[in-house]
Image (cartoon, rainbow, N blue to C red):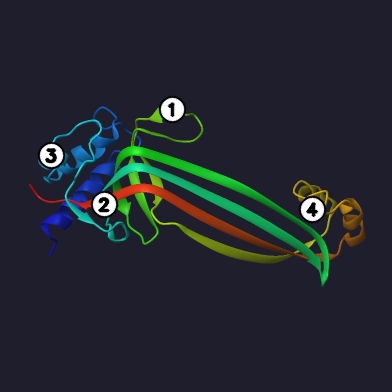
Amino acid sequence: MVTTTRKIQQEVVTFAKQKIGHKVGGGECFDLANKALAKAKGKTASDYGNVTLAADYVWGDLVATAMAQPGDILQFRNYQLKITTTTLTKVTHGKDPVAEYDGTGTKTLSRPHHTAVITKGGAKKLEILEQNVVRGTSGVKEKKVGPETIPHTNNSSTQINTKKVSVTKGWGTKAKKYIAKKNWPNFDSLVKHYMKKSVTEKTTVTVKVQVTGTLKAYRPKPK
C-alpha cells in the first residue's frame, strides 16, 4: 500500500517532469517545489515559517542527503561544485614508449540560494529538476524547468581503457595535437618509424569532485 508521504513524493515528481521545458509560476526556483507540493496536497515552505527572499526554506522532515528519494525537496546554500577531469594517454609498442599526452578539463557549478525537486537519489549524487539557473555558457538564468546532476560528496574515480590501434598518418595528425613537444620533439619521426604497426594506447581518466556549501534534503509531509 502506498503511504501518504510516498504518494506526495510521486505526485511531486510527476508534476515536475510534466513541466520540463516550461516555466512554473514566475520562473523562480522556489515556485517549482512550492506548486508541486501544493498540487500534491503536501505542506509547503510557508507552513514552516516566513517565506522571504533570503530564508533557508524548510519543506518537511530533514533527511540525510545520501538517503534522499525522488519527490524530496533539495535546498541549497552557497553550494559550489568543481569537477576536474584529467586524461593521460600512454602509447607504447611492446615495451618501447612511443608517446605520452594528457589534458585537464574543469566544470564548475554554483547554486548560492536555490531550491529543486529530487528525481533520483544516490550515495554520491542526486538528479534534480530545477528552474531559474544558468545553463551552458550564456550567463543568463533560464526560467524553464530542466534537469541537472548534483554531486553532494567529495569523491574521485579512475577509469583505465587499453586498446590496440594501427599507426597511420591520420592517427599521427590527431595524436600530435595533444603531444607535449618538450617530451616528444621527434614525434613525426616516431610516426614514420611505426607506420602500419600496431601500438597500444592506455588511457587513464581521473575525475575529482569537490563540493562546498550546504545541501539539505526534505521529505514532504501531508497537509
Task: State how far apart marks 4 and 1 are (Cα).
Answer: 40 Å
Front: mark 2 or 4: 2
Three-letter amino acid code of the residue under disc 3: Gly
Residue matched to label 2: 217
Q: Quadrant of residue 207?
A: bottom right
Q: Of 130 and 67, which appears nearest the observer?
A: 67
Front: mark 4 or 3: 3
Three-letter amino acid code of the residue under disc 2: Ala
Contact flag, marks 4 and 1 (Cβ < 8 Å): no
Task: State how far apart marks 3 and 2 are (Cα).
Answer: 17 Å
The quarter of the rendered structure image containing the N terminus is: bottom left
Residue matched to label 1: 140
Decide if residue 48 is on the left or right side of residue 169: left
Rendered location of residue 94, percent (x, y): 82, 72
Q: What kind of element bears circle 4?
A: helix
Rendered location of residue 10, percent (x, y): 21, 52
